[in-house]
Image: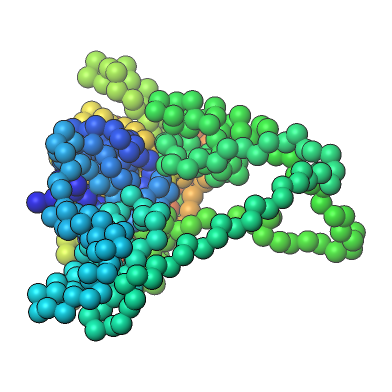
Amino acid sequence: MSRIKEFNLPDLGEGLLEGEILAWLVKVGDTIELNQPIVEVETAKAAVEIPAKWGGVVTRIFHDAGTVVEVGKPIIAIDTEPGSPLPETPASAPAASAAAAASSPSAASSAATASSPSAGSSAAADEAGAGLIGGPAPGGRTAVLVGYGPRTTSAQRRPRIGTPTPATTAAAPPPPPAAAEVRPVEPAGPVSETVAPAVRTGPVLAKPPVRKLARDLGVDLATVNGTGPLGSVTRDDVHLAASVPARMPAPVAASPATAVFDASREQRIPVKGVRKLTAENMVASAFTAPHVTEFLTVDVTRSMKALEKLRKRPEFEGARISPLLLVAKAVLLAVERHPMVNSSWSGATGEIVVKGYVNLGIAAATERGLIVPNVKDAGRLTLRELAEALNELVRTAKSGRTAPADMSGGTLSITNVGVFGIDTGTPILPPGESAILAFGAIRPTPWVHKGKIRIREVTTLGLSFDHRIIDGELGSRFLRDVGAFLEDPEATLLSWT
């Protein structure tokens, strides 16, 4: 068994076909241990660190950071026995003897005049061994070990049996070429003092947020000198590189009447990873599920007061509570009253699958793109547990560490567009789900309250649903119940439970 083992990119979740190498955590020559993280890879669902399958010394890295690699292709080679000598090639000794014989005139003469059967079999063996490591290669070339280069001396091809070749005639070596006269070249103009930035030849170590920042600022990470751990590029390094403009020759002035639109004013962003999967899912959902969206404007003043009361209760001490918590609770309670909303359409079996559990998805905008991780069986959680689960879900998503399992199996989702100051929207259904709720911004708004115009806290909800499963009546009742909870959560909890 070979001591140099190649580690292939594994399938990181549910039949994914490729992954992008974000950063190498090791370099050639490093000694690594079993299960030590060696590379960070981004798939269409998550960014994960892959551990080493063997311990040893890194001998080769096949792909630089930023490369998209197919699952099953090698990404790194590891010498699992770095302390032991390399195994000798059995053909190395015959190759050395053949080289010595070829360099001797007497040996060449003997080979040319040999006519015995044993000599013929030996020549046949030489032809059969052509191309093997340590043996003669076809066409008179010398086979060598990879990485050691060919011999610098010219190879002499052994004549075949029966071919008349003068044994005493030796080819005279070609005369050495005449030395060319070297003359100093005068520069055509003043020498520029601008020094081009050094281009990195190895993989660039940088975290995903730093890579995005570099793309936004138009900075090539290969030209940035990293000052972070293991020579990694930091945000400060990118900002410093962006603040030093490159000296470029002055462009030729174009005609004032002619607008120039060339590639220098365009940006091309590869569609891969999370963005690629999101695009595919949204297209599939938009053209397979008939979407309907309804809107409801709600006075949530009492919900905001209820949040202040929760923050003061001992059981919620230290918990981060936001309006999203009450919206999530309202959706879970409304599902109990209208179970059909929490279902999916099975075209293969011609059935509607109603779920007895709610895996509540929360859309999260991250630097890698939009993802929708979900809280498993959210309906069984207490209000404090639900608050902690929502906070952990969003925190993990924004750090880029969401596991693929946390983004699968969702049954119903919420997208909080209000954090961006947006009133509402018409969200597209995640594949396999029948409803998604858009939660808009909460604004102080003139509102008729108890027959008088008051300034109240108001928001707008937008519910998109699959019209194959949810008709207008069911969607309207569900949205009405969510709004009723947010208008007066304390009274609703008492009347519904």
Q: Nearer the viewer, residue 259 or 410?
A: 259
Q: Quadrant of the C terminus?
A: top left
Question: In the drawing, does residue 311 fall left or right of residue 122?
Answer: right
Which residue is farthest right? 256
| Colour scheme in use | rainbow
Q: From where the camera sits, is residue 276 visible? A: yes
- List x then y, in percent, for residue 75: 29, 50
Q: Nearer the viewer, residue 376 or 184?
A: 184
Seen in the image, is 152 located left or right of residue 317? right
Q: Quadrant of residue 223?
A: top right
Nearer-the-camera pick, 108 or 47: 108
Q: Nearer the viewer, residue 405 or 436?
A: 405
Q: Residue 467: image x %, image y %?
A: 33, 69
- The residue under the point 76% across, 46% down is 183
Task: Give the vertical position of 295 relative to 368 (above or below).
Answer: below
Q: Is residue 24 above or below residue 152?
A: above
Please state the horizontal and vertical placement of residue 135, each as a whole percent of the image.
22, 62
Q: Identify whether 140 is placed above or below 482.
A: below
Question: Residue 175 is drawn in which quadrant?
Answer: bottom right
Picture coordinates of residue 453 (x, y %)?
56, 36
Q: Could you tell me how many numbered marks the image carries?
A: 0
Q: Is 198 placed left or right of 313 in the picture?
A: right
The residue located at (37%, 31%) in the rendering is: 322
Residue at the (48%, 57%) spot, across then down = 270
Taking the spot 32% from the left edge, 41% from the top edge, the residue there is 40
Q: Where is 261 relative to 233, above or below?
A: below
State whether residue 468 appears in this view: no
